[in-house]
Image (tube, helix red, strand yellow):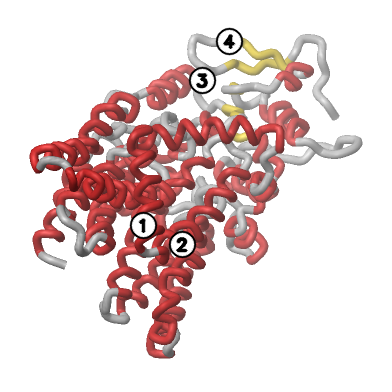
């Protein structure tokens, strides 16, 4: 690859990074499906264990970024990790395109446009300005593909060794990178005698296992009882609970059939949003033309796309569509091939018209930039911080705040343990009281808090645990709730305040449950 090509890819990364920095959220945000940001940032800052699967690779990188001496908030610094990862992915797409279109006319120009098209796509940009694991997932996916293509074109075996290490580390960021492995076998199958040699395969396998060793971080982190310590993975049982995401396994393939049409409709809109409907048509044309010319890469892409898309489609959460970022990366590469196909079709036109077609295609990333700017821009977004200020400034000293949803829970964790506001205040998540490890964690964090299991007839529900928590602590701590459940009104009165929080008081004339 020529030095010009490398500098061009670096320019693509720089251009996208500048755009991301201009639109980066200045702090914690709920936007762009970023509710988990408070959990991830707090775990990184306190060297803790975030929600399953623990994301140890992301957590360690985020911990480093969180300690950079820049930006208005610690959340901004972790948001910056997402921006750098997304910009790196865009630059790698430019490099990958150069390898995939080696003899194409206007190869460098189309490769740059391909990287920018992906960089300014709606979903990647939305994740590049918040704290989440998905742009790092995309960067890892792009880097894996680039290493395989380098090795395939006669590069050193060290490329495959590094790919093995990166795949192991990638599983420490997000498990959906596993769908890359069978696709890689399809891509490299013609060279199977070369990569199946022990001098290639064994080092790659060994480095893959070394990459998986990143999960050792979880039990080591849990040993000092950080304020975010999901599953307390010091024991083998707790470790497996976190790593296998036992808490969320019911969501996998859990989408009800009556929701299929709704999800198909939302996905159709999602596809059209990425590069524009015109861009999607160019991608499909490029895939078809590529299939006619050389099918190996298209088969590779399909083996990666179809299982990942099926898993994502059937995953019963509202934000699972973010798992599709590697799919959109592949569609961007098809977009570049589609641009070359349109130039091929225009070969019979006058040269001036051919130049006009080329200029129009190269300007499409700028159109995507203009279209997606407003919806992606979070540079003035302070909603989560306003929630924190209003909530924490309104409660009395030594209060206990009972929370229910992830949004308020993770935001308050960030306020208490990262920004260290109101160290006198305790926060307890109602649904998480159902877990023994969480009750133990509360006792460790707040020694004066009474956390016990009530004696009830029938099945113990987390509602019962919340009532017990309130009843046993209301005499010595002022109590508040951010999002109370209606069933709690049997025993307690919720008094509205000027802040987005309720004061909890015993109901007149009611005796607490025994």
Q: Tell me, yes or no, if residue 426 can be seen here.
A: no
407 and 349: which is toward the camera = 349
Q: Give the foreground label among 2 and 1.
A: 1
Q: Residues within 10 Å of mark 1 (few under 14, many from 20)?
A: some
Residue 494: image location, x then y, percent: 65, 14
Q: Which residue is mark 4?
A: 496
Q: Secondary structure at mark 2?
A: helix
Mark sitting on residue 396: 3
Residue at left offset 30%, top offset 24%: 374
Which residue lies most toward the right here?
457
- Disc on res. 159: none
Mark nearer the viewer, 3 or 4: 4
**Secondary structure type for disc 1:** helix
Task: For marks 4 and 1, give the one nearer the viewer.
Answer: 1
The residue at the point 67 percent across, 24 percent down is: 474
- Separation of residues labelled 3 and 4 (CA atoms): 14 Å
Q: Residues within 10 Å of mark 2 (few under 14, many from 20)?
A: some
Q: Which tag, 3 or 4, sits closer to the chain's start?
A: 3
Q: Which mark is residue 299?
A: 2
Give the number of the mark in front: 4 or 2: 2
Instruction: Name the residue beneath numbered marker 1.
Output: 290
Residue 88 rendering spot, x and y as whole percentages: 26, 52
Are the residues tagged 3 and 4 within 8 Å (C-beta)? no
Pointer 4 or 2: first along the chain: 2
* Residue 209 relative to residue 18: left or right: right
Left/right of residue 392 with respect to residue 466 in the rendered view: left
Q: CA distance from mark 4 to mark 2?
A: 59 Å
| Separation (CA) of disc 3 from disc 2 | 62 Å
Q: Residue at (43%, 39%) from the top-left corner?
A: 37
Q: Does the image show residue 367?
A: yes
Q: Quadrant of the N terminus?
A: bottom left
Cβ–Cβ under 8 Å for marks 3 and 1: no
């Amino acid at each position: 690859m020529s030095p010009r090509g490398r500098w061009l890819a670096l320019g693509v990364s720089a251009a996208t990074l500048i755009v991301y920095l201009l639109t980066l959220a200045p702090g914690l945000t709920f936007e762009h499906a970023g509710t988990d940001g408070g959990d991830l940032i707090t775990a990184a800052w306190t060297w803790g264990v975030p929600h399953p699967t623990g994301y140890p690779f992301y957590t360690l990188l985020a911990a480093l970024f969180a300690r950079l001496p820049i930006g208005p908030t610690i959340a901004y610094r972790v948001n910056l990790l997402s921006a750098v990862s997304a910009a790196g992915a865009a630059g790698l797409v430019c490099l990958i395109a150069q390898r995939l279109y080696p003899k194409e006319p206007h190869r460098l120009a189309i490769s740059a446009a391909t990287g920018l098209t992906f960089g300014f796509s709606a979903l990647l940009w939305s994740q590049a300005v918040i704290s989440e694991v998905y742009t790092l997932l995309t960067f890892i996916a792009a880097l894996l593909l680039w290493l395989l293509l380098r090795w395939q074109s006669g590069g050193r075996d060290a490329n495959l060794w590094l790919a093995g290490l990166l795949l192991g580390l990638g599983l420490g960021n997000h498990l959906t990178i596993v769908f890359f492995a069978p696709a890689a076998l399809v891509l490299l199958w013609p060279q199977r005698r070369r990569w199946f040699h022990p001098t290639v395969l064994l080092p790659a396998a060994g480095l893959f296992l070394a990459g998986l060793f990143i999960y050792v971080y979880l039990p080591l982190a849990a040993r000092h009882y950080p304020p975010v310590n999901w599953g307390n993975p010091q024991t083998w049982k707790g470790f497996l609970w976190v790593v296998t995401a036992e808490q969320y396994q019911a969501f996998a393939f859990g989408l009800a059939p009556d929701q299929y049409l709704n999800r198909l409709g939302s996905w159709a809109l999602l596809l059209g949003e990425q590069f524009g409907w015109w861009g999607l048509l160019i991608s499909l044309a490029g895939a078809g033309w590529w299939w006619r010319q050389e099918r190996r890469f298209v088969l590779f892409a399909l083996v990666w796309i179809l299982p990942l898309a099926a898993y994502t489609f059937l995953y019963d959460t509202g934000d699972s569509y973010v798992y599709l970022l590697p799919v959109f990366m592949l569609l961007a590469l098809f977009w570049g091939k589609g641009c070359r196909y349109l130039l091929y079709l225009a070969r019979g036109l006058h040269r001036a018209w051919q130049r006009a077609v080329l200029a129009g295609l190269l300007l499409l990333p700028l159109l995507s930039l203009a279209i997606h700017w407003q919806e992606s821009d979070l540079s003035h977004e302070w909603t989560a911080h306003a929630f924190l200020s209003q909530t924490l400034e309104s409660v009395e000293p030594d209060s206990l705040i009972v929370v229910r949803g992830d949004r308020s829970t993770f935001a308050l964790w960030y306020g208490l343990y990262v920004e260290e506001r109101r160290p006198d205040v305790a926060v307890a998540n109602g649904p998480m009281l159902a877990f023994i490890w969480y009750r133990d964690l509360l006792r460790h964090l707040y020694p004066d808090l009474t956390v016990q299991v009530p004696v009830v007839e029938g099945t113990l529900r987390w509602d019962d645990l919340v009532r017990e928590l309130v009843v046993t602590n209301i005499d010595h701590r002022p109590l508040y709730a951010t999002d109370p459940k209606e069933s709690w009104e049997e025993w307690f009165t919720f008094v509205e305040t000027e802040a987005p929080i309720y004061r909890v008081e015993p109901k007149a004339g009611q005796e607490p449950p025994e």
